Amino acid sequence: MSSKQKNLSEHKTQKFPGASGYRIAIAVSEYHEKITFALRDGCIDALKKYGVNEKNIFVSVIPGAFELPLAAKWLYEKKKADAVICLGCVIKGETDHDKYINQAVAQGVMNLCLKTGAPFIFGLLTPNTLQQAKDRAGGKHGNKGVECAVAALQMLQLKDSLKKK
């Protein structure tokens, strides 16, 4: 279903046993901070709602989206994070810069997942306009930060369940 037709943050309420012990790092770009900080706030609220202990949530503000993969790597290593959530926003401009940045960040985040075996969550908004970004940062399409928090917890629960088998 297209985003024009629904709030993308709607999801069934879930329980995440053991979430209080998860260590979650969040790397958030300060570029477009009204957007990215709204993503951060939604993410933190969702993590706490689902039981992650506030002392186990580590937030670092970084310059821009391109820096997300390296910051995520450092947070994973230094904070001994179980999952890292990468939040940013690249709005299409007059040049193709957005394509290069978005592709580099996506590839960097995926490489971290595969290299470490830990969830690194891609929370980079890639809208065409500022309004589209606002719609996805607490507006009519929900908050991508909330979606990222839920995705991180779902992946950690999957990892835990596979360890038990």
Image: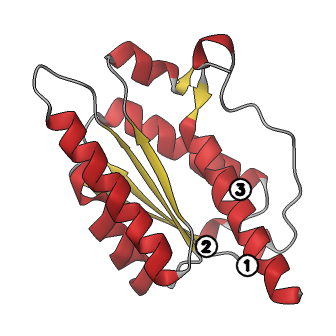
What's the residue at 51%, 26% (across, down)?
136
- Please provide percent x and percent y for residue 79: 46, 82
Look at label 2 and name its amino acid. Answer: Asn
Badge 1, how many Cα within 10 Å: few under 14, some, many 20+? few
**Is disc 3 placed on a helix, strand or loop?**
helix
Return the residue nearer the eye: 5 or 144.
5
- Quarter of the image where the N terminus is located: top right
**Distance from Cα at disc 1 to Cα at disc 3:** 12 Å
- Report x, y in % for residue 98: 22, 35
Left or right of residue 31: residue 163: right
Residue 79 visible in the picture: no
**Residue 115 percent across, percent down from the top left:** 44, 81
Residue under pointer 1: 21
Residue drawn 69% across the image and 65% down it: 155
Q: Can you identify the residue that label 3 sits on?
A: 48
Mark 1 in CB contact with mark 2 (< 8 angstroms): yes
Mark 1 vs 3, N-terminal side: 1
C-alpha span from label 1 to label 2: 7 Å
Sequence-wise, which precedes: disc 2 or disc 3?
Answer: 3
- Residue type at mark 1 is Gly
